[in-house]
Image (cartoon, helix red, strand yellow):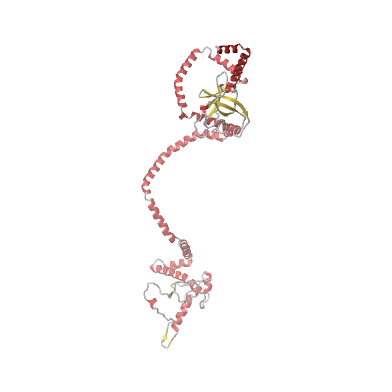
Amino acid sequence: MRPPRILAAIFESTVLMGTITVVVVALAVYLSYVAANGLPFVATYQVSVQVANADELAKNADVRVGGARVGQVLAITPEPASRTWPHPFAQLRLALDPSLGPLAPDTRYRIRLSSVLGGKYLELIPGHLRAGRIPDGGTLRLSTNPARNHELPFVDFDTALGTFGPATERPLRAALAELGDIVAGRGNQLNDSLYALGRLVGPLDRLLAVVATPSSQLGALITGAARTTSALASVAPTLTDLLGRAASTFGVLARSRLGAAIDQAPATEAVATGVLARSVPVLAEAHRILAELRPAAAALPAAARGLDQVVLAGTPIWRPVPRLASELGGALAAVEALARDPASRATFGALGSDDLATVGSSAFVGLGAVLRAAAPAQFACNAIGLWVRNFASSLSEGDASGAWLRAMPLFDQSQSSQAATPAPDLHLNYYPIESPRQCQAGNEGYTGAQLIGNPPRTSTTVDDTAPPPGVLEEGRKAGLVP
């Protein structure tokens, strides 16, 4: 019976009951205060995330994954611009369920609206990478590089409504009033529109299903368009100036002859069409000719090779042609001079057209050629005079038995019989050069070595004989004596 008495004594003690009541109330107040930041003595996984704008996100706001609450925001701290983010931002310290951590390094997040009445929460989208997990106390940072930025852009309903400021409220109210006047008394038309809209929903739903498939890459298109507009925003003044200048340029072109040329383009095209139509028979005939020539194309390589061989073989032959043409020109000039000479015409006229005339003219021409060829040798080297003198002396000199030729033949067995090669000491000049530069006949020096043909150099000094009076002067006038 003692325990009931002890309990009764406790409840009857006013001081003790007051103390117990104060302790319980204080404990309840403490628990209600700290419960906002999580129950005491309960482990949590804490990480920090950086957001560009924490507007209307309150402390102790929910952190959700797929709509389920997995933690709360313990603190919101403003931060200045950093090395990776050029603007001020807010850093959120999160307390998450331990089963959620550690988060993957490709985890994304965004601030979303809880309801149309207000309030926001932080939505986490866990990643899938295994390497580089975020440890307890780690931070997911903002970055200007889209590939490294963890925050996803999101436009909430309140942000969209915020665009309708005082400057747009009055025009919007007037537009709604006018819209009311427009739909008034048009119930049947609205019903028809709704019926047509109902029929449109089915195909539209299928169209949106096709667009929503990953293969359509609509998200990539929108993202690319957003990046394109962001890139163009930085050069908007330059682009505007470019468009303005282009407008001026096109205005000048419109006032120039270019506009008249464009106006004449249809007529020009009509004329060109007629010309091309008339060219069709010619082109068809050309096509037929080319088709007939096609078999001959197979023979072109062989013909080209033969022509190449002809050109290669004929090149050495054609090289002396200019010299021959020059000499032939001189010969023709001499013939022309002969034909113009009155004495020549009288001579040929006297000869007539009988055979004697032909023989005489041929002999005359041949004698002229012989004299023209022998004249340089005579005037430069006195060849005829020396030959006549030596021939005369060979007939006049001798003894009692008679005259003899001043010649002594030398016979060499290796030179007088047939051999595969000439004798090593053979000295023979078939056609000695007789000109103002050299007088080789009788001036070839014998060296004991083989020399067949013209020696490299001989003297121009020969025995002088007295020519008949006036011969040298006539030779100089004819250009035969230097």
Residue 450, how many percent across, how many down?
A: 44, 74
Q: Is the residue 41 above or below the residue 403 in the image?
A: above
- Asked whether residue 163 appears in the rendered view, the answer is no
Give the residue at the far bottom of this rendering: 400
Number of labelled discs? Answer: 0
Give the residue at the far front of this rendering: 1
To which quarter of the image does residue 236 belong?
top right
Q: Is the residue 449 above or below the residue 13 in the image?
A: below
Residue 438, how many percent across, how many down?
A: 50, 72
Give the residue drawn at x 44%, y 23%: 206
- Asked whether residue 373 appears in the rendered view, the answer is yes
Residue 306, how many percent across, how many down?
A: 39, 55
Q: Is the residue 143 above or below the residue 192 in the image?
A: below
Depth check: 92 or 165 in front? 92
Quarter of the N terminus within the rendering: top right
Q: Is the residue 327 above or below the residue 33 in the image?
A: below
Give the residue drawn at x 46%, y 16%: 195
Depth check: 352 or 268 in front? 268
Residue 340, how many percent across, how many down?
A: 48, 64
Depth check: 263 or 248 in front? 248
